C-alpha cells in the first residue's frame, strides 16, 4: 500500500487531520509503547502552530450534531518557540514522518514559521493552514486566489520541504485557489477544512459556542468534501489530501476515487482512537 | 511525563467492546455493570468514554454522535467488572440507560487522572453532590481498603436521588437534600463548613455541580485546606485530541480529560466554576 506523496514515501494512504489527534496526549493516555507500536497513521500532522502562544477560545467549544460536530477551539498552541522546545523533541520520536501545520496572521508570520521548520530535520513537510484572515489585507488567504498565490510564492522561496496548502471550503471558488497554490509552487493541497457553522443555546437566540461560530466536521460534511476534492482534482496535477467526514474504508475509497492521493481521518478519531487503523484495514479489504 | 501521570492507569490503546452484565434502578439513577475482560484496574476519579454499539444516534435530533464520559463507580478485579451510575439528562445518557444485560458498548479507558491520598495524619473528607457521588464511591472504597477513615457528606435534590447513598453501604455519612425529604434540609457545602469546624486536619475531595465545587473551593481556600475537585466538561474524545474540554486554571486553559478530571482546587481560576 506504499504511497509516494510530494517526495515522501508513506506506508499507506491514511494520515490524521490536523487538530484531531494529539500524539503527545495520546502517549500519556494510552502509553507510548502501545501508541507507537500501533500508530494509526502513515504520517503525523500536528495541530496548527502559530508564531505566538495562543490559549484558544473561551468555552463552550463543542456542539454535537447528529452526524458530526461544531468546534470553536481557537487554535490553542504553545507558539513556535514553545513548540520547538517542548513538542518537537517528543514528536521527532514518532515512528512516522512529521508534517507540521502552521498558520500566520500576516505573511511575515507565515514566513517566520516556515523558515524555522524548514531548518529542522525532524520535519518532513509543512502544511499551511490558510483558513485565516491576513490582518494586513483583511482577506481570508484561502478564499482568495491572489492572496494565496502571493503567500505561497513567497513561502516557496524559503523552503525546499514539501509545502501542502490546506484549503478552506468557505470560499467561492475552491478550485481557483487550488490552482493558484499549484502555480505558486505548492507540492500538494489538502481539503476540506471545517465549514463555518453555528449553534444556538437551547431555548434561546444566543449563540452556544464561546466564539459564536465554529467549524462543522464529521460525516455531515463528507458529501461536500467529495465534491470539492473531485473539482480540485480536475484542475490541478499536484497530489491531494482528501478529508471530511471519513468514518470507514468506504468513505476513504470514495475520496481516493474522486482524486485524492492520501486521506486524512479527523473527527472519527474522537469516536474511535484507532479509527485510522480501522479505515486503513477496511480500505485494504476493498482492494484499494 | 507530567507529574499527574502517577495518578493515572493508562488505557489500552483504542476502544473495545464490553458487554452489559446487569442494569438496575437505584432511586432516580441507573446502575450499569459491564464486563471488561482483561481491562486494567482504574484509579478512583478516572473515567471512561462509552457509546452503545447499537442504536447510538437514535435521539430526536440524530444524536448522540460522540461517546459519553462516565466516571466509574466500582471496579471488581475478581470478575473484571465495572459499575457505572447514570443520570439521564439527554440522548446519550438515555440510550446508555436503556441497555439491558447482553447488549454491548464501546469502551475506552480508564482516562484522566484520579485522586491522590492525603498524608496519614490528615482525614479525607469526601463531598458529593448528586451524580457527583460516583467517583467518590470508588474513592471511599479504596481509602477504606487502605485503612483510612474518610468522612462522607452527600447532597441530593430529594429522597429519590438520595437513594443512591446506599451504594456506599453501611458507611457513616451526612446526607442533605434540597427539599428536606431525607437527611438535613439544605446544601451539602453548609454541612461541609460545619463538619470542618469539628475536624482536625482535613483534605477535601469533591465532585458535583459547578456551583457546589466553587463553594467547596472557597471554603477550603479560606481554611487553608487542600481540596481536589473532580470536574466535568463536555467532551468529544476523552484522550486529549480535540481541546474541547478545557477549564480555566491559573496556568491557562487545561484539558479536563487529560490533566484532570481531578484538579487541585487551588489551580482552578476564579470564576471558572461559575
Ligand atoms: C469526567 C466526567 C465524568 C462523568 N461521570 C458521569 C457519571 O458517572 N454519571 C453520569 O450520569 N454522568 C457523568 N458525566 C456527565 C455525562 O458525561 C453527561 O451527562 C453526558 O455526556 C450527557 O450526554 P447526553 O447526551 O445525555 O446529554 P446532552 O444533551 O448531550 O448534554 C446535556 C447538556 O449539554 C448541553 N447540550 C444540549 N444539546 C447539546 C448539543 N447538541 N451539543 C452539545 N451540548 C449540548 C446542554 O447544556 C445539556 O443540558 C461525566 C462527565 C465527565 C466529563
Ligand atoms: C476539534 C477540531 C480541531 C481542529 N483543529 C484544526 C487545526 O488546528 N488546524 C487545521 O488545519 N484544521 C483543524 N481542524 C480541521 C480538521 O483538520 C479537518 O480539516 C476537518 O475536521 C474535516 O475532517 P473530519 O470531518 O474528518 O473531521 C480541526 C477539526 C476539529 C474537529
Ligand atoms: S475531550 Fe477532547 S481534549 Fe478533552
Image (tube, coloured by chain):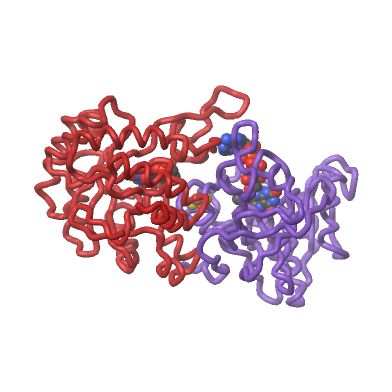
With respect to residue A78, does B11 lie above or below?
Answer: below
Which image quarter: residue A21?
bottom left
Q: Colour of chain B?
A: purple
Name the spot of residue A79 as percent of width and height, x first: 31, 52
> Which residue sits at x=70%, y=53%?
B103
Name the spot of residue B97 as percent of width and height, x first: 73, 47
**Residue A16 left/right relative to B95:** left
Q: Tell me if residue A153 can be seen.
A: yes
Name the spot of residue B5 as percent of width and height, x first: 52, 68
Q: On the rendered image, what quadrant is the N terminus of chain A found in?
A: bottom left
Pick the residue in front: B121 or A191: A191
Residue at the farthest left position: A157
Name the spot of residue A282 as percent of width and height, x first: 44, 54
**Residue A76 left/right relative to A120:** right
> Which residue sits at x=28%, y=25%?
A172
> Which residue sits at x=18%, y=32%?
A147
Which image quarter: residue B264?
bottom right
Pick the residue in front: A167 or A111: A167
Q: Which chain is red?
A: A
Q: Tell me if residue B214 can be seen.
A: no
Amino acid at each position: 500500500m506504499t504511497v509516494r506523496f510530494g517526495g515522501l514515501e508513506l506506508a499507506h494512504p491514511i494520515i490524521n487531520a490536523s487538530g484531531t489527534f494529539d500524539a503527545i496526549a495520546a502517549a500519556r493516555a494510552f502509553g507510548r509503547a502501545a501508541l507507537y507500536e500501533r500508530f494509526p497513521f502513515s504520517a503525523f500532522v500536528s495541530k496548527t502552530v502559530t508564531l505566538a502562544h495562543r490559549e484558544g477560545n473561551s468555552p463552550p467549544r463543542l456542539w454535537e450534531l447528529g452526524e458530526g460536530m461544531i468546534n470553536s477551539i481557537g487554535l490553542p498552541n504553545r507558539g513556535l518557540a514553545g513548540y520547538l522546545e517542548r513538542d518537537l523533541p517528543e514528536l521527532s520520536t514518532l515512528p512516522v514522518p512529521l508534517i507540521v501545520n502552521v498558520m500566520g496572521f500576516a505573511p511575515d508570520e507565515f514566513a517566520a514559521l516556515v523558515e524555522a521548520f524548514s531548518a529542522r530535520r525532524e520535519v518532513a513537510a509543512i502544511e499551511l493552514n490558510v483558513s485565516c484572515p491576513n490582518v494586513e489585507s483583511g482577506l481570508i488567504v484561502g478564499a482568495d486566489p491572489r492572496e494565496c498565490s502571493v503567500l505561497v510564492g513567497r513561502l516557496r522561496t524559503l523552503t525546499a520541504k514539501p509545502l501542502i496548502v490546506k484549503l478552506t471550503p468557505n470560499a467561492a471558488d475552491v478550485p481557483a485557489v487550488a490552482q493558484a497554490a499549484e502555480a505558486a509552487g505548492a507540492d500538494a493541497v489538502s481539503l476540506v477544512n471545517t465549514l463555518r457553522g453555528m449553534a444556538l443555546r437551547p431555548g434561546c437566540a444566543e449563540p452556544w459556542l464561546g466564539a459564536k461560530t465554529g467549524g462543522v466536521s464529521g460525516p455531515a460534511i463528507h458529501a461536500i468534501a467529495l465534491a470539492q476534492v473531485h473539482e480540485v482534482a480536475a484542475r490541478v496535477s499536484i497530489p491531494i489530501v482528501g478529508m471530511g467526514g471519513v468514518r470507514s474504508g468506504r468513505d476513504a475509497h470514495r475520496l481516493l476515487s474522486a482524486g485524492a492521493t492520501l486521506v486524512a481521518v479527523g473527527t472519527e478519531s474522537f469516536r474511535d482512537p484507532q479509527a485510522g487503523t480501522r479505515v486503513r484495514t477496511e480500505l485494504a479489504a476493498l482492494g484499494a | 511525563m507530567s507529574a499527574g501521570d502517577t495518578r493515572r492507569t493508562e488505557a489500552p490503546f483504542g476502544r473495545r467492546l464490553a458487554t452489559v452484565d446487569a442494569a438496575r434502578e437505584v432511586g432516580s439513577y441507573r446502575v450499569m455493570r459491564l464486563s471488561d475482560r482483561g481491562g486494567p484496574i482504574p484509579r478512583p476519579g478516572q473515567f471512561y468514554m462509552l457509546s452503545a454499539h447499537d442504536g447510538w444516534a437514535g435521539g430526536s435530533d440524530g444524536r448522540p454522535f460522540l461517546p459519553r464520559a462516565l466516571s466509574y463507580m466500582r471496579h471488581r478485579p475478581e470478575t473484571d467488572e465495572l459499575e457505572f451510575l447514570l443520570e439521564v439528562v439527554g440522548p446519550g445518557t438515555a440510550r446508555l440507560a436503556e441497555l439491558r444485560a447482553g447488549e454491548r458498548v464501546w469502551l475506552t479507558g480508564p482516562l484522566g487522572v484520579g485522586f491522590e491520598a492525603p498524608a496519614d495524619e490528615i482525614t479525607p473528607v469526601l463531598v458529593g453532590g448528586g451524580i457527583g457521588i460516583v467517583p467518590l464511591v470508588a474513592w471511599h472504597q479504596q481509602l477504606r481498603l487502605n485503612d483510612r477513615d474518610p468522612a462522607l457528606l452527600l447532597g441530593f435534590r430529594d429522597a429519590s436521588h438520595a437513594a443512591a447513598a446506599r451504594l456506599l453501604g453501611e458507611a457513616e455519612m451526612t446526607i442533605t437534600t434540597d427539599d428536606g425529604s431525607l437527611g438535613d434540609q439544605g446544601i451539602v457545602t453548609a454541612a461541609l463548613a460545619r463538619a470542618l469546624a469539628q475536624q482536625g486536619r482535613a483534605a477535601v475531595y469533591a465532585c458535583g455541580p459547578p456551583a457546589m465545587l466553587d463553594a467547596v473551593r472557597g471554603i477550603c481556600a479560606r481554611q487553608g485546606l487542600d481540596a481536589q475537585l473532580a470536574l466535568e466538561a463536555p467532551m468529544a474524545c476523552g484522550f486529549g485530541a480535540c481541546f474541547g474540554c478545557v477549564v480555566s486554571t491559573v496556568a491557562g486553559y487545561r484539558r479536563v480529560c487529560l490533566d484532570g478530571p481531578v484538579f487541585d482546587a487551588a489551580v482552578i481560576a476564579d470564576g471558572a466554576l461559575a
